[in-house]
Amino acid sequence: MGVRCTDGVVMAVEKLVVSKLLLPGTGKRIFTVDRHAGVAIAGLIPDGRQLASVARDECKQYTDLWGSPVPAKVLSGRVSTWAHAHTTMGWYRPFGCNALIAVMTQAEGPQLWMVEPSGMSYSYFGCAVGKGRQVAKVYLEKLDFATLTCRQAVTELARIIYKCHDDPSGKPFELEMSWVCTESGGTHCSIPADIQSAAEAAAKAALEAEEEGAD
């Protein structure tokens, strides 16, 4: 899930903890592909790592050629072209994942794009992919993107993911979040631990309050 704010872009991913023996942070779904750009994956992690590697190479090639950071539209176009090529050749298979691309440049400002396995790409104010995306979209549509800041978006995305989490097996999950914004100096990086912890605490408290109210 990702949101484009007034001062940057925030992305958040729900990761099921499939074993109690796993170390926290295992199975990353958010990758930094350039100083100003990040990619979040929903779907098969190995396929997502491959798309992130493609995005990283495209960022480097663009910078080497033009001497400036790759624009979001160019990056998403090149990644989507790569994804589409895997649907047209018999010796390949389509990628089993969607990719959210967060980019912030001085010329464009914050940008959020989504690349589908088919090779289609779209620009969004807010986007949800994967399991539970329909419910998440309902909550995203209620946000005021004209005034939403990244600090506020961190709390909102945490709240939405906790509300939309639905796993019959009862497995716990980790919340992985990143941003590229004015506060991070235009650099894509993980959300600071204290900010994310506060957002998760607020999300859990809101969920508990709703459950108590329902009872």
Image (spheres, rainbow, N blue to C red):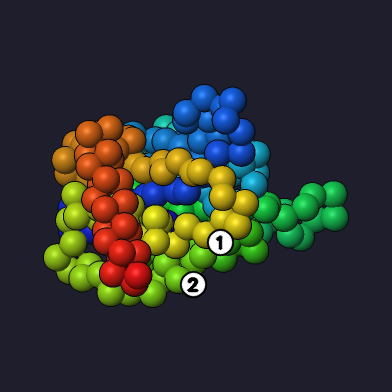
Furthest toward the right, the residue is 90
In this orientation, does residue 62 appear?
Answer: no
Residue at 31% x, 64% y: name it. 212
Which label is found at residue 120? none
Q: Quadrant of residue 70?
A: top left
Instruction: Say which element carries label 1.
Output: loop
Q: Position of residue 68 (x, y in %)?
A: 32, 39
Residue at 42% x, 67% y: name it. 136
In this orientation, does residue 138 appear?
Answer: yes
Which residue has dot 2 on it? 134
Which residue has dot 1 on it? 131
How many residues crowd around disc 2 within 10 Å: few (fewer than 14), some, or many (20 or more)? few
Instruction: Say which element carries label 2.
Output: helix
Mark 2: amino acid: Gln
Circles 1 and 2: CB atoms closer than 8 Å: no
* Observer-nearest of 189 and 213: 213
Residue at 39% x, 61% y: name it. 163
Q: Position of residue 171 (x, y in %)?
A: 56, 45
Residue at 27% x, 39% y: name it. 197
User: 179 above or below 115?
Assistant: above
* Observer-nearest of 22 and 120: 22
Furthest toward the front, the residue is 215
The N terminus sits in image quarter: bottom left
How many residues crowd around disc 1 within 10 Å: few (fewer than 14), some, or many (20 or more)? some
Q: Quadrant of residue 179?
A: top left
* Observer-nearest of 3 and 102: 3
Q: Position of residue 192 (x, y in %)?
A: 26, 34
User: 196 above or below 155?
Assistant: above
